[in-house]
Amino acid sequence: MTARRPAALATFLVSTGVALSPVSASAQAPEPIAVTVTDKGCEPAALTVPAGKSVFKISNKSRRVLEWEILQGTMIVEERENIIPGFVQSLSATLQPGAYEMTCGLLSNPKGTLTVTATAATAPGTPDPMALVGPLAAYKLYVMGEAEAFETQTTAFAEAVKAGRIAEAKALYPVARRHYERIEPVASLFNDLDKSMDVRADDFERKEADPGFIGFHRLEKGLWADNSTEGLTPYADRLVADAAELKRRLADLTIPPAKMAGGAAGLIEEVAATKISGEEDRYSRTDLWDFHANVEGSRKIFDLLRPLVASRDPDFVARTEKNFSRVETLLAKYRTEGGGFAPYDHLSDRDRNALKGPVTVLAEDLSTLRGKLGLD
């Protein structure tokens, strides 16, 4: 097979939506930048940092679990999820010069501003671009397949809601959501769509009464908590429109290698932080569907990147494979006829604790994947 020339490679990268931008590497580790999030917003509300790698120390002094995000327009550049009240978590971000925003707790809180200033060029520290082309292109195809299925299944779910077919809508709810959950690392890059489709009542001061509480979980509340579809048509129509818009944006998206690699850990960390506790699908108790879809999405990323990591750290690959198998075996215990999962409230505390250990171990291992590929 003829080797790709630079021009041909560039064309291939553009056509598959692959991003292989250089990542600057500083000679010394940057000093951490402190950010405190209260019930009212960020302190400080405005930050200026030099281009390159920055480390943020986010302190949660609010009364709720929160996520802290760096945004550029509607795109999430970096994020740290599930920061518990009273705790501090770190986030490393390699940022290009420009204007960014910071999320600051409740969605109703004002966003902070983050200005990144240009600096003298530093030595590049990139992995071999050629080695990443295949995995990134394959992942883009996987993402687009799931986006197509997500739009199709979400449309069917919405039609059942609008027609008042409650039993059918309940059956289709987890089926549609699993396609989003599999590709959440890139689907959730679009902050506006993520907040529209997957927002929870806890993200608002007025909880379920807030008009901003829409999307899947608003429909979930209507179907299970209220056992009614009355008034849900506007939410169903908005969800279908958002699913179509997500597919359109994903088609144009250039997937950053660090987002793909980091997504493997992010999906499992989300399971450990929110799904084990049962707070995600609190009305329907379909948490295990989301849980399983997150594991599938994480496994897909790991499988695509495994050949690159195996040459560097075969012990890591063997250990991670074993941990994936443990989690998948545990989940299989709760399968039901037809391919679904038992309601999450049917699991005992002992069952949930049995899941938590392997999931946490898997998340910890996968958190090193970006670093092993030189993508931090």
Image: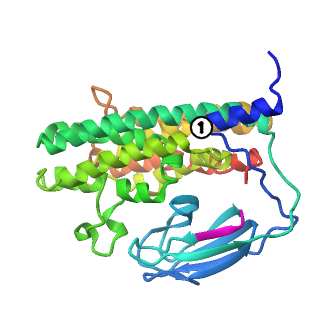
Give the residue displayed 55% in from the left and 59% down from the top.
Answer: 76
The location of residue 291, given as percent across then percent down, is 42, 44
Residue 173, image quadrant: top left
Q: Nearer the viewer, residue 172 or 320?
A: 172
Give the residue displayed 71% in from the left and 63% down from the top.
Answer: 96
Q: Nearer the viewer, residue 263 or 270?
A: 263
Q: Nearer the viewer, residue 259 or 344?
A: 259
Pointer 1 residue: 301
Using residue 30 as the reference point, say whether residue 180 is left or right of it: left
- Residue range corresponding to the magenta coloring: 96-100
Quadrant assignment for the C terminus: bottom right
- Circle 1: element type: helix
How many dots with numbers? 1
The location of residue 87, given as percent across then percent down, is 54, 74
Classify 264 as above or below 322.
below
Give the residue displayed 66% in from the left and 40% down from the top.
Answer: 18
Give the residue displayed 27% in from the left and 26% down from the top.
Answer: 337
Quadrant assignment for the N terminus: top right
